[in-house]
Image (spheres, helix red, strand yellow):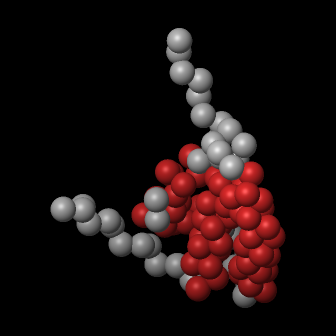
Amino acid sequence: MVPELPPLPALTRAEGELVDAYLEVVDLLGKINPSRSTHTYGALRAAQALVGRAEALREALTLMHKRGESEVHADTLARALRVLDGERRTGRVTVPQTRAS
């Protein structure tokens, strides 16, 4: 049985879009990461998709700014990222540690 995740914190629509777009960008960067990828075609497709997702990320931030949401509530957004498996997903962007021989 899968453990029940905590509920997402209350977010504005723009904050929700920011979190979603950010995680989509992270997922694509994880697929592009040369230290973790195995095929150039998959990395190429991810790089092509990255442009559109980066634009969505920019639009979410632009919307927040236009609405007067001038502060990023990092603790709240971090909780949302954790609920959405952000720690594992961002881990794919890093260079893996070398294994001791």
Q: Is residue 58 above or below residue 13?
A: above
Residue occupying image coordinates x 74% and y 70%: 49
Q: Nearer the viewer, residue 34 or 61?
A: 34
Residue occupying image coordinates x 65% and y 45%: 38
Q: x, y percentage for residue 43? A: 72, 55
Q: Is residue 47 above or below residue 51?
A: above
Q: x, y percentage for residue 34? A: 72, 43
Quarter of the figure with residue 70 = bottom right
Quarter of the figure with residue 17 = bottom right
Report the side of 78 relative to 60 (left or right): left
Report the side of 101 relative to 56 (left or right): left
Residue occupying image coordinates x 42% and y 64%: 83
Is residue 26 in view from this perspective?
A: no
Q: Nearer the viewer, residue 19 or 49?
A: 49
Q: Nearer the viewer, residue 42 or 64?
A: 42
Q: Quadrant of the N terminus?
A: bottom left
In the picture as drawn, the residue positioned furthest to the top comes out as 101
Is residue 52 in view from this perspective?
A: yes
Q: x, y percentage for residue 96? A: 60, 34
Q: How many marks?
A: 0
Q: x, y percentage for residue 40? A: 74, 51
Residue occupying image coordinates x 24% and y 61%: 3
Quarter of the figure with residue 69 = bottom right
Q: Is residue 99 above or below residue 53?
A: above
